[in-house]
Amino acid sequence: NAGVTQTPKFQVLKTGQSMTLQCAQDMNHEYMSWYRQDPGMGLRLIHYSVGAGITDQGEVPNGYNVSRSTTEDFPLRLLSAAPSQTSVYFCASSYWTSSDEQFFGPGTRLTVL
Amino acid sequence: DQQVKQNSPSLSVQEGRISILNCDYTNSMFDYFLWYKKYPAEGPTFLISISSIKDKNEDGRFTVFLNKSAKHLSLHIVPSQPGDSAVYFCALNAGNMLTFGGGTRLMVKP
């Protein structure tokens, strides 16, 4: 099992550009989520999904879109990047709910100039 | 307003001694409490958890204590080892969402 994979590992964008952060898991987990980590602020939930076709907003959803067309994939889209979105992004998955053990990907470090 | 706080940004402990990491919260709706450990340039990994109906859970060297009346969670590591040096996050669950504390950097000195 590869676990949770994220691509790319690093990305630099200019303000206003759009991009998609990819996340995939091969553990047949229903729950998937995206977090951003900023210095001194821990991880903050952006969006989550409890199964294919179902997504919901987390704590900091503005500026981000998600979709869940398959159980395996949960891409995060930045529609128009802003410097405030400079952060490290982590994707995670768990069997059913957020209170189950979550398995995290290695992260994507994004810089918006 | 932060619902979950880890008031100690860092903690230094001698190898073999006890490490105590603390987490305070304000929301009574949290029903499950978890600790995650994070090494640099890696994603967090799950360590231990406790449900709101318990006040203690133990797994090897790691014990989590929950004091609901004080809205306080703590993680004890005994004995501490150099490999435990990492950032530790408490994560509290309500509904289908986790709220993380800001993290405590633990350094275990040989």
Image (cartoon, coloured by chain):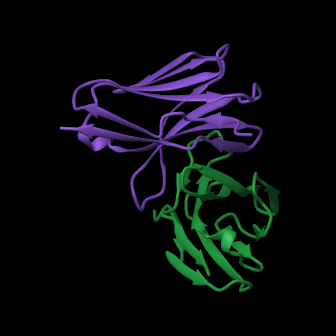
A31 and A104: which is toward the camera? A104
Decide if residue B76 is on the left or right side of residue B3.
left
Decide if residue B86 is on the left or right side of residue A9.
left
Most distant residue in the left direction: B110
Q: Quadrant of the N terminus of chain B?
A: top right
Q: Quadrant of residue A54?
A: bottom right
Q: Residue at x 74, y 84 (%)?
A: A16
Q: Quadrant of residue A46?
A: bottom right
Residue A10 seen in the current view = yes
Q: Which chain is purple?
A: B
Decide if residue B33 is on the left or right side of residue B9.
right
Q: Residue at x 27, y 38 (%)?
A: B108
Chain A, which colour? green
Residue A30 seen in the current view = no
Q: Quadrant of the C terminus of chain B?
A: top left
A89 and B106: which is toward the camera? B106
Give the tally of numbered discs.
0
Most distant residue in the top direction: B69
Residue B103: percent from the left, percent from the top? 51, 43
Reply above or below: A28 against A95: below
Q: Quadrant of residue A111?
A: bottom right
Q: Residue at x 72, y 28 (%)?
A: B26
Reply above or below: A102 against A64: above
Decide if residue B83 is on the left or right side of residue A91.
left
Residue B4: percent from the left, percent from the top? 65, 35
A63 and B52: which is toward the camera? A63
Residue A4: percent from the left, percent from the top? 53, 62
Residue B16: percent from the left, percent from the top? 22, 27
Q: Residue at x 57, y 74 (%)?
A: A110
